[in-house]
């Protein structure tokens, strides 16, 4: 099994924290769950981090059966819906996200 994770770094704009996390649940989570070949989706709201990662405000993980399935998911039209869901919340935060793919041991 392989997991593709998105690590969001920066900060949520002041006063928008609850709206941001509500939008993640209402818009982004369904789009991520609908990704081609996605087996499970997990979201994490960090509460503490060691330096220099104190600016991580969201971690997302999606499990896939294989690297080939990840490639298919990223090339599918369903990714466009996930990207649109992300675009709908970008105004609520300042920062960027980075992806990492790892294999379960």
Image (cartoon, rainbow, N blue to C red):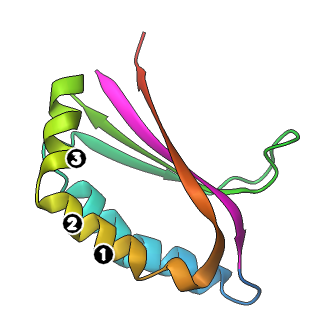
Horizontally, is 18 left or right of 105 in the view? right
Asked whether the viewer can see residue 66, the reply is no
**Is 77 or 58 nearer to us in this picture?**
77
Q: Which residue is mark 1?
A: 84
As measured in the structure, the alpha-carbon distance from the residue carrying label 3 to the one carrying label 1 is 14 Å
Q: Position of residue 34 (x, y in %)?
A: 18, 58
Residue under label 3, please give it. 74
Q: Quadrant of the C terminus?
A: top left
| Circles 1, 2 touching at the beta carbon (< 8 Å) | yes
Q: Position of residue 78 (x, y in %)?
A: 15, 60
Mark-to-mark CA distance, 2 and 3: 9 Å
Q: Report crowding for label 2: few under 14, some 14 to 19, many 20 or more residues within 10 A (C-alpha).
A: some
Q: Which residue is mark 2?
A: 80
The circle drawn on residue 95 is: none
Against 76, is 49 above or below? Answer: above
Name the residue rendered at 34%, 48% in the picture.
41
Extent of the magenta region: 1-12
Whole-number angstrom distance, CA of label 1 to CA of label 2:
6 Å
Q: Main secondary structure of the magenta part?
A: strand
Residue 2 covered by magenta stretch: yes
Instruction: Please tell me which of labels 2 and 3 falls first in the chain.
Output: 3
Mark yes or no: residue 98 visible: yes
Residue ID at (36%, 77%): 26
């Amino acid at each position: 099994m392989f997991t593709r994770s998105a690590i969001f770094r920066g900060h949520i704009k002041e006063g928008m924290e609850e709206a941001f996390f509500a939008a993640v649940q209402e818009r982004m989570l369904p789009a991520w769950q609908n990704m081609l070949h996605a087996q499970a989706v997990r979201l994490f709201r960090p509460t503490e981090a060691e330096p220099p990662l104190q600016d991580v405000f969201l971690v997302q993980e999606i499990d896939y059966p294989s690297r080939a399935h990840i490639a298919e998911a990223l090339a599918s039209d369903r990714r466009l819906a996930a990207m649109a869901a992300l675009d709908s919340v970008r105004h609520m935060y300042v920062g960027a996200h980075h992806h990492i793919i790892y294999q379960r041991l």
